[in-house]
Image: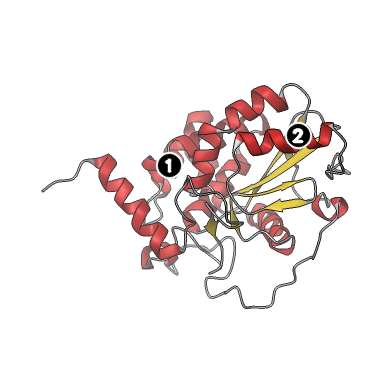
């Protein structure tokens, strides 16, 4: 029996989640590590098949042989200064730099939970809290797997004013380009929607300086305790799960009431 395309993609996502240690189902948010795609294998989600770890293609972010037990340094109880340390890449942020609450999200382009957050929570987060000056929102790259890695490089090569638009298109159109193999043509089909040409895209994937800087961002995230995506810092509190709007509203309210909720200041750039 032939399966409809949407059903085939859903099955692929489900199988990949099992193989790669993806988090539990979306509604379950109680455990600290619920609803995330993990990075425990160095490449993580969407990278556990031979085609996605093909030696003929670059591995931009992480050693495919790395494991969680390699003894990487993790900062215990990171401070605001630790979280907001100067990055070699411009911080992609929206909202007032001096907003009372700063939310830092670490995201992987192939993460289904990041997609769900962006489609179902972010629009209201923007309307209620970012646009009103209550929250500064920072999006940081934490690519898990080669497909995510290549899409992330393309994302950073887009014009800065197209960054969030392209991120949204990658999230919205995950079914069109995420698979058990790396499909550069499909990734480019998304990138060209914000005006990127194929020569620009191809040159971007060979930009070793960009790759090194993105690797710094991911390695810094690991040092801060990021284990997968989505992970969030609200102030200095690390939340290893997909956040709901109600949870965000609660943190904002705590900050407004000045009950001791730590809030991150603007990045010292």
- Give the residue at x 62% y 52%: 207
Mark 1 secondary-structure assignment: helix
Q: Dot 2 corresponds to which residue?
A: 252
| Alpha carbon separation for disc pair 1 and 2 | 31 Å
- Give the residue at x 40% y 64%: 19
Tell me, for residue 228, which label it has, or none.
none
| Foreground of the two, 154 or 233 | 233
Query: In the image as oriented, which residue stretches furthest toward the bottom?
Result: 70
- Whole-percent x, y for residue 18 in the image: 39, 62
Q: Is residue 207 left or right of residue 180?
A: right
CB under 8 Å between callouts 1 and 2?
A: no
Q: Residues within 10 Å of mark 1 (few under 14, many from 20)?
A: many
Q: Dot 1 corresponds to which residue?
A: 174
Mark 2 secondary-structure assignment: helix
- Whole-percent x, y for residue 162 in the image: 61, 30
The answer to whether residue 54 of the structure is visible from this angle is yes
Instruction: State whether residue 22 is above or below residue 152.
Output: below
Q: Is residue 267 left or right of residue 28?
A: right
């Amino acid at each position: 029996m032939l399966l409809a395309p949407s059903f085939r993609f859903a099955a692929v996502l489900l199988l990949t989640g099992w193989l790669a240690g993806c988090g539990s189902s979306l509604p379950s948010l109680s455990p600290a590590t619920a609803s995330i795609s993990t990075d425990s294998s160095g490449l993580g989600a969407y990278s556990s098949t031979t085609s996605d770890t093909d030696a003929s293609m670059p591995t931009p972010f992480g050693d495919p042989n790395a494991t969680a037990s390699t003894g990487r340094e993790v900062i215990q109880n990171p401070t605001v200064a630790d979280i907001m340390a100067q990055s070699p890449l411009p911080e992609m942020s929206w909202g007032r730099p001096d907003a009372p609450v700063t939310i830092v999200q670490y995201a992987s382009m192939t993460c289904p939970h990041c997609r769900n957050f962006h489609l179902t929570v972010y629009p209201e987060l923007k309307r209620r809290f970012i646009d009103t000056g209550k929250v500064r929102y920072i999006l940081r790259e934490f690519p898990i797997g080669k497909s995510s890695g290549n899409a992330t490089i393309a994302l950073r090569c887009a014009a800065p004013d197209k960054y969030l638009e392209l991120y949204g298109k990658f999230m919205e159109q995950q079914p069109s380009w995420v698979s058990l193999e790396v499909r550069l043509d499909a990734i480019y089909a998304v990138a060209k929607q914000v005006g990127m040409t194929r020569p620009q895209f191809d040159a971007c994937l060979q930009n070793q300086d960009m790759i090194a800087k993105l690797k710094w961002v991911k390695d810094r995230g690991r040092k801060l305790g990021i284990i997968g995506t989505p992970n969030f810092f609200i102030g200095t509190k690390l939340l290893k799960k997909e956040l709901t709007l109600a949870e965000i509203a609660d943190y904002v309210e705590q900050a407004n009431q000045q009950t001791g909720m730590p809030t991150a200041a603007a990045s010292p750039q």
